[in-house]
Image (spheres, grey):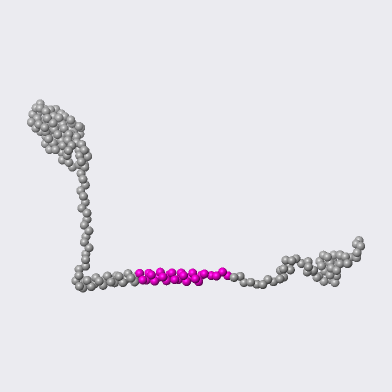
């Protein structure tokens, strides 16, 4: 038991000392009215009751109108420059046509550009003969022995093969053997001679013995 008389709160129905003016649990006074102590309210609640003055946020300045004006000015300058260029070109064409008509009316012949002379192609130089070889049936023929009255057909190989040099055949002693322009050797008398084939500055020799 408590030493002090107890009373029951009419709101929360909890007991507390009769010496208290209010219920320590819910703050209700003895008269039965719930009057919360303003001093016990949180500072955040009291601060929220104070209405702050309403301020409209300032908007940053807009540069859109200025940009649109600059863009429009640039487009206008481009259009004007293009129009002037086209106009100048048309004026130049008209002046040239008018000048041509005046020349035609005055009987002035229109100058005709002279044709450009084509360069004359220089002839391709022929390669120089580097070597010549007398052959018989495709084999090298340094010399041969044949009786009088026989014939031997000699041939030559000229290097390089694409030369057009003429091959000249000669005999050192036509009384022993003769040779024509094709390299045909004819043994006409006993003895010894040489057959020479020459192309340009290069030559080859074939020895001949007859009896």
Q: Position of residue 130 (x, y in %)?
A: 21, 38
Q: Position of residue 127 (x, y in %)?
A: 21, 42
Dominant secondary structure, magenta: helix
Q: Position of residue 140 (x, y in %)?
A: 20, 32
- Asked if residue 120 shows in the view, the reply is yes
Instruction: Establish if 203 lies above or below 91.
Output: above
Closest to the observer: 5 or 187?
A: 5
Instruction: Establish if 194 lies above or below 128.
Output: above
Question: Where on the picture, by quarter, is residue 203?
Answer: top left
Q: Is residue 106 magenta?
A: no
Residue sitting at 72 percent across and 70 percent down?
49
**Magenta residues (range):** 59-85
**For residue 158, side relative to residue 57 (left or right):** left
Closest to the observer: 134 or 117?
A: 117
Closest to the observer: 17 or 185?
A: 17
**For residue 63, side relative to residue 24 (left or right):** left
Quadrant where the N terminus sits is bottom right
Closest to the observer: 5 or 70?
A: 70
């Amino acid at each position: 038991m408590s030493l002090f008389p107890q009373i029951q709160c009419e709101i929360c129905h909890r007991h507390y000392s009769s010496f208290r003016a209010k219920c320590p649990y819910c703050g209700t006074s003895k008269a039965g009215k719930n009057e919360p102590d303003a001093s016990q309210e949180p500072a955040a609640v009291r601060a929220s009751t104070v209405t702050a003055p309403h301020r409209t946020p300032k908007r940053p300045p807009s540069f859109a109108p200025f940009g649109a004006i600059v863009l429009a000015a640039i487009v206008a300058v481009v259009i004007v420059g293009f129009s002037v260029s086209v106009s100048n070109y048309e004026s130049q064409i008209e002046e040239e046509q008018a000048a041509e008509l005046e020349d035609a009316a005055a009987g002035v012949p229109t100058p005709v550009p002279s044709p450009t002379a084509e360069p004359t192609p220089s002839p391709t130089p022929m390669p120089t003969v580097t070597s010549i070889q007398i052959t018989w049936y495709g084999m090298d023929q340094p010399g041969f022995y044949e009786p009088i009255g026989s014939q031997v057909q000699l041939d030559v190989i000229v290097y390089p093969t694409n030369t057009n040099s003429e091959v000249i055949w000669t005999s050192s002693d036509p009384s022993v053997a003769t040779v024509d322009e094709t390299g045909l050797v004819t043994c006409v008398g006993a003895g010894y001679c040489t057959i020479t084939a020459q192309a340009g500055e290069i030559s080859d020799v074939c020895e001949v013995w007859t009896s």
